[in-house]
Image (cartoon, rainbow, N blue to C red):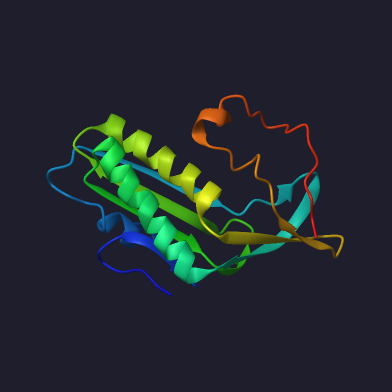
Amino acid sequence: MQSSASGGFQLWDSTLLPEQLRRTVQDPTCGGYASFEGWVRNRNEGQTVLRLEYEAFAPLALREGQRILECAQERFGVVHVCCAHRIGELTIGELAVWVGVSAVHRGEAFDACRFVIDEVKHRVPIWKKEHYTDGNSGWVNCEHCAAAPSEEAAHSDHHGHEHQHA
């Protein structure tokens, strides 16, 4: 799956191209633009990560992702919104997810961008499998980490709970 010029919610099985994605939300009527990039990091839960894999139930992921974008447009009054998420195998430092929002004013763009990434992590059926340096691997399933935005304020970097890895 690849990008389209119309923006929307997208699943990519190859490298995300932020410059190309940004063009889908550019608009001369907009004075504000906000984006978010999520990268593959090399540590999680005290373990060194070598690489990861993302799998998605594509029909539902695309449908639910699009609903989130439509909700962001309605709720925040933004003009354009786009989100692209990788699937497949990724290496450390690769771009895993990109969100871009354009609006008449910056405040709405910032708010909508945060809303989109939080909702995507919480609602879209995309699963992450980490591969560790010790040879083990595990599917990451942390509902607390994907908490709704209102709950994030109380959520610190140290979770205080165990994560289950398969």
Where is residue 24 drawn, in percent x and y?
26, 58
Extreme residue in the bottom direction: 1
* Image point (21%, 45%), residue name: 79
User: Is residue 33 something one can see in this rendering?
Assistant: yes
Specify whether 51 is left or right of 116. right
Is 44 or 163 nearer to us in this picture? 163
Whether residue 6 is situated above or below residue 121 in the rendered picture:
below
In which quadrant is the C terminus drawn?
Answer: bottom right
Say which residue appears at 40% left-offset and 72% top-offset: 2
Residue toward you, 121 or 41? 121
Residue 16 shows in this picture: no
Tell me the quadrant of the picture where the N terminus can be found.
bottom left
Q: Is residue 21 left or right of residue 80?
A: right
Q: Give whichever of 118, 13 is nearer the camera.
A: 118
Q: Give coordinates of residue 78: x percent, y percent.
A: 25, 41
Query: Left or right: 49 with respect to 9?
Result: right
Residue sticking out furthest to the left:
29
Q: Residue at 22% x, 51% y: name it.
A: 26
Q: Picture coordinates of residue 152 (x, y %)?
A: 57, 31
Nearer to us in this view, 161 or 14: 161
Q: Is residue 51 left or right of residue 163?
A: left
What percent of the width, then of the height, locates residue 84? 42, 59
Q: Residue at x 26, y 66 (%)?
A: 5
Q: Is residue 93 above or below residue 116?
A: below
